[in-house]
Image: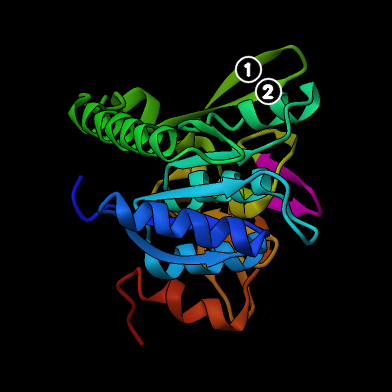
Amino acid sequence: MEGTRVLIVEDEVIVAQSIVSMVEKMGFESVGTAMRATKALEMARLHKPDVALLDIKLKGEETGIWLAERLKSELNIPFIYLTSHGDKRTVEEATSTVPYGYVLKPVDETSLFVTIKTAISRFEAEQTERSEQPKVMAPEVVKESIFVKDEYQYVKISLSDITYIKSDGNYIEIHDGQKRVLKETLKNILSKLDDSRFIQVHRSYVINIEKIDKIGSAMVFLGGVEIPLSKNKKDDLLTLFNTLH
């Protein structure tokens, strides 16, 4: 744990300076202090600290809890809350982010040292455990199909049966011999398909290249269905096939 790098997010200057002194006295390295959550997030992205100490209540629109959620989801940085607020609502909101510890103000040096050490040990153990977990490989039947909700049940659709998918705002239509309407975005469904046979040929259309019959100047033909083809997508599509002139 030597060389542990700590980011301190505290909007009271005197308190922040005191914590910096404590941290450095413990043999840790302070990568800096921030008074606002947005600035702290920028610093975290830049310095990648090993742990962050976050005051729950900060000046500005965003709180320490807002920052904690982003440190966790975006940067995978463990965090410890600094707080003098013990009301039930604040505690419940803070607890929901699953912090690596709490340090009450006024900050006690021994308590801070133990909490930082414990947080780093717990975080490292979690990372080791996660890396050692066996990866489950999806069987071929899973890779070759998706399940879509149809009223109160999920129906399996084979990817090979899908001709095209059309976007209509926040909804999509999956055409596989019938039309299935889902509340979903085209970008999201394309990422879920994870299949080399699908390509987006227009901002509103994804097609199954195995179903293509003809490629025109501005249209693609799939089993009698005409799909618009964007000019900038045509070359991408043609490179997938052997073409003769």
Please name the amino acid that badge 1 sits on.
Tyr
- Residue 219 x/y as whole percent: 63, 72
Check residue 86 for magenta coloring: no
- Residue 83 x/y as whole percent: 64, 38
Magenta stretch, main secondary structure, is: strand
Q: What span is colored magenta in the figure?
A: 166-174
The disc, 1 or 2, on the residue closer to the chain's N-terminal end is 2
Question: Dot 2, crowdedness within 10 Å: few (<14), some or many (≥20)?
Answer: few
User: Residue 135 or 30: which is nearer the viewer?
Assistant: 30
User: Residue 82 or 147: which is nearer the viewer?
Assistant: 82
In three-dimensional space, the C-alpha distance between marks 1 and 2, rounded to whole angstroms, equals 4 Å
Q: Residue at x 65, y 48 (%)?
A: 64
- The numbered dot on residue 154 is 1
Q: Are marks 1 and 2 in contact (CB under 8 Å)?
A: yes
Residue at the limit of the structure toward the bottom, as seen here:
245
- Residue 183 x/y as whole percent: 76, 38
Read off the residue under disc 2.
149
**Quarter containing the C terminus:** bottom left
Check residue 168 for magenta coloring: yes
- Residue 208 x/y as whole percent: 50, 51
**Quarter containing the N terminus:** top left
Q: How many marks?
A: 2
Side of 180 relative to 233 (left or right): right
Residue 13 occupies quadrant = bottom right
Question: Dot 1, crowdedness within 10 Å: few (<14), some or many (≥20)?
Answer: few
Please name the amino acid that badge 2 sits on.
Lys
Side of 134 relative to 153 (left or right): left
Q: Give above or below for 80 relative to 158.
A: below
Residue 196 visible somewhere in the drawing:
no
